[in-house]
Amino acid sequence: MLLISLFIATLFLAYCNGANDNCKGVATLFGSRTTSYQTAILWATFTTLGGAVTATFLAGTLIKNFSGKGLVPDAIANAPEFHIAVALAAGLTVLIATLIGFPISTTHSLTGAIVGAGLVAFGLQVNFAVLVNSFILPLLLSPIIAIFLGAGIYSLSGYINSKWNLPVNQKRIDACHFISAGIISFARGLNDTPKIFSIVLIIEYFSIQGGMITIAIAMALGGLLNSQKVAITMSEKITSLNHIQGLSANIVTAILVIIASRFGLPISSTYVSVGSIFGVGLTGKKLNLRVSYQILLSWILTLPTAAIISAITYRLLQG
């Protein structure tokens, strides 16, 4: 019964992840009016599924990182109650943000949930050195790097255009924009699917290939049915985007997320994609500071919210 509950809780997390995250690679397509929301989300769904399937061959490090092993003692990391608490807490945290319309990090939610349940189970025996070096630092650095790169690439494109007065081929720009959005969604599927799958890794008869594909389908459904509020926040409320700004932000996001997936770094595709949009918005001096502060606050609250829900859930499951 516990293993069935764990499987359902993991699918719930995957659905919530899709609802909050699937639009992030294509938000600039929608925001720059390159295409409609419906076309953008279908493109995101298709390419995310491609990344999820590829993850079965490339993302072993991320599966290991988010199983909880090394962060909490193995006796707890292998307990179904621990994984149920983590999945439910991370899923609920992401769902709350999705219903409000805030783009938050499933990676950050999972980290908080692992810490919350781990503290209840073993107190200060949680390995905080691993937490800081393997989880917190990559999460904190990723949006900062994305902001600077987003601002830099957009500024460079403007400089090159003003220096050489290059002719603008809108069809080529739009094609590159679509390709970059597809790469981001592919990379997101590659990066997020193994993190979520790590929760059901203790179910021995669950194959990696079958498990990841099942999770990918749940993510796709979440994106198709419940991602519009987050998409509007990212595409319209943070800053207005022209075609070049949207493409610049997407190039940065694609590069950073693919590098992170290749080397098993638990960065957040959310923080990278939002950070790159912040960067081009700052350069264009059109950044909506009120919405930006609200998103930043939601990021700050993500980890403690997931930790509290996970701690309570784990305590209840213990009886």
Image (tube, rainbow, N blue to C red):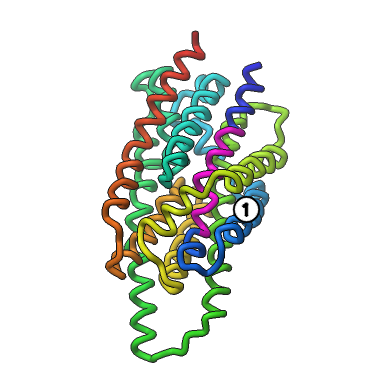
**Residue 75 visible within the image:** yes
Q: Secondary structure at mark 1?
A: helix
Give percent across and percent down for residue 282: 29, 65
Q: Is residue 254 above or below residue 90?
A: below
Q: Badge 1, how many Cα within 10 Å: few under 14, some, many 20+?
A: many
Residue depicted at x 43% and y 69%: 248
Q: Is residue 15 a member of the stretch shown in magenta?
A: yes
* Residue drawn at 63 percent across, 56 percent down: 42
Looking at the picture, which amino acid does disc 1 mark? Thr
Residue 171 lies left or right of residue 133; in this view the side is right
Name the residue: 55% across, 66% down.
35
Looking at the rendering, the stretch of residues picked out in magenta corresponds to 11-26
User: Residue 127 at what x, y percent from top left?
Assistant: 38, 29
Number of marks in the rendered image: 1
Is residue 65 shown above or below 121? Answer: below
Asked which quadrant contains residue 301, the reply is top left
Q: Is residue 291 left or right of residue 4?
A: left
Q: Does residue 27 lie above or below 10 as drawn?
A: below
Q: Position of residue 181 (x, y in %)?
A: 54, 63
Name the main secondary structure of what is drawn in magenta.
helix
Q: Is residue 151 left or right of residue 211?
A: left
Residue appearing at x 69%, y 43% in the figure: 213
Image quadrant assignment for residue 1: top right
Residue where numbered disc 1 is placed: 45
Q: Is residue 304 left or right of residue 65?
A: left
Residue 259 covered by magenta stretch: no
Q: Is residue 193 visible?
A: no
Depth check: give the residue in front, 317 or 98. Answer: 98
